[in-house]
Amino acid sequence: MTETDHDAGFATTLAKGLDVLRAFRPDRNSMSNVEIAAETGINRPTVARLTYTLAKLGYLKQEKSKYRLSWGALMLVNPLLINAKILQIARPSMQKLAQDVGGTVSIGVIDRVNFMYLETSRVNENTWTSQDLGTIGPLLPATIGHALCAQLDDTELGLKLEQMRRSAPELWDKYSDAFMEGVADCKSRGFSVVRGTWIPGTHSAGVPLLRDKNGECFAMNCRVPIFRLSPNQIEEEVGPRLKSLAMNVRSQLAFVMP
């Protein structure tokens, strides 16, 4: 039973079509109907109808027995990205921090029980690859998840916790305590830290960025390979620098926005 089961206004077919589009990611850019069905939990006949329709509308491109996103799908996000002044302002400082610490710096938003990256700066594409636009990961184990959820009010956070507990019980059992500690750290000192427990070989810091007038939460993280860090550098340098970067972005954004 889900929260939409008794919602008479909820368009189930539309939701399933959007779930099909959301199934495509950088590491899954071409999938068959069988693969899409396995990824989304939608039965195969329904997936076949949805992919056929989405291809007819220009959102998917069929290549033999597989589908990939078509350029038409870009039109769904293009108006958002064009007006995303936060990304334009943050980009130079993100790149400098990534270069200085030898890691990656990303901005993300909440996507149900996940985060979604909107922008990533990296130290060097040949030596350190990173997630790009549209990449999704779970909120629970990630510092950017801590930072995003730290901006929710008590009621919103309670609902989000329940959603995460129901949707990913294994992640909940493993990471919920650390998640709550990370949210508290973001509220008290302005950033949280994860030491190699989610992505092996890396430490990460996350910081709240802002919540806009539409209620959308933005946050940043910086992930660095452990071999590039001194023992306490993630807490003593990376976290504070990321916090300062976020403060600078907020200041510049307040200056340029009406």
Image: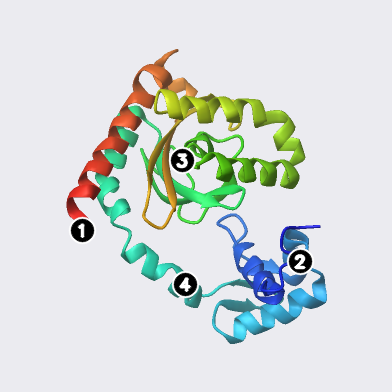
Q: How far apart are marks 4 and 3 (CA)?
A: 26 Å
Whole-percent x and y of residue 114? 59, 48
Mark 2 lies on residue:
6
Residue found at the far bottom of this picture? 56
**Comparing labels 4 and 1, the label whose residue is closer to the camera:** 1
Q: Distance between the residues labelled 2 and 1?
A: 41 Å
Q: Is mark 2 on a helix, strand or loop?
A: loop
- The mark that comes first in sequence, 4 or 3, is 4
Q: What residue type is labelled 2?
A: His
Q: What residue type is labelled 1?
A: Pro
Q: Is mark 3 on a helix, strand or loop?
A: loop
Whole-percent x and y of residue 208? 41, 38
> Height in image: 205 above or below 216?
above
Mark 4 lies on residue:
76
Residue positioned 60% across, 63% down in the render: 22
- The mark that comes first in sequence, 2 or 1, is 2
Q: Residues within 10 Å of mark 2 (few under 14, many from 20)?
A: few
Q: What residue type is labelled 4?
A: Leu
Mark 3 lies on residue:
151
Can residue 200 be seen from the camera position used here? no
Q: How far apart are marks 3 and 2 (CA)?
A: 29 Å
Q: Residue 258, labelled with which disc?
A: 1
Q: How far apart are marks 4 and 1 (CA)?
A: 25 Å
Q: How crowded is mark 4: few (under 14 residues within 10 Å), some or many (20 or more)?
A: few
**Comparing labels 4 and 2, the label whose residue is closer to the camera:** 2
Q: Which sits in the foreground, 97 or 175?
A: 175
